[in-house]
């Protein structure tokens, strides 16, 4: 199953590793959207920055 992830808050002001997690997901700028396959690793990354992103099921 694929998920669509959108960066809705800036990681500036949060811990450095949270910004790096967003970059590792491919989220560079505000409102960037990526569609990725849902794996345990991706779910963990989403959970780590859940306060910065919006997640939906992709079509």
Image (cartoon, grey):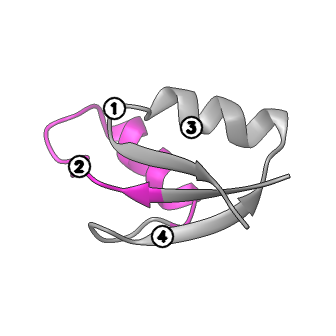
Magenta span: 6-26
Closest to the observer, 24 or 1: 1
The picture places residue 41, in percent across and down from the top left corner, at 77, 37
C-alpha gap between disc 3 and disc 2 = 13 Å
Lower sequence index among marks 3 and 2: 2
Is 23 situated left or right of 46 in this image? left
Lower sequence index among marks 4 and 2: 2
* Residue denoted by label 3: 46
C-alpha gap between disc 3 and disc 1 = 9 Å
Question: Callout 4: helix, strand or loop?
Answer: strand
Question: Callout 2: helix, strand or loop?
Answer: loop
25 falls in the magenta region: yes
Q: Which mark is residue 9?
A: 2
Mark 4: few, some, or many residues within 10 Å (few <14, many ≥20)? Answer: some
* Residue denoted by label 4: 33
The picture places residue 36, in percent across and down from the top left corner, at 72, 62
The quarter of the displayed image where residue 47 is located: top right
28 up-or-down from 48: above or below? below
Lower sequence index among marks 1 and 2: 2
The picture places residue 52, in percent across and down from the top left corner, at 33, 41
* Residue denoted by label 1: 51
């Amino acid at each position: 199953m694929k998920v669509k992830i959108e960066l809705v808050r800036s990681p500036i002001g949060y811990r450095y590793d949270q910004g790096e997690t967003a970059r590792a997901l491919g989220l560079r700028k505000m409102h960037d959207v990526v569609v990725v396959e849902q794996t345990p690793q991706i779910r963990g990354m989403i959970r780590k920055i859940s306060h910065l992103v919006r997640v939906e099921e992709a079509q």
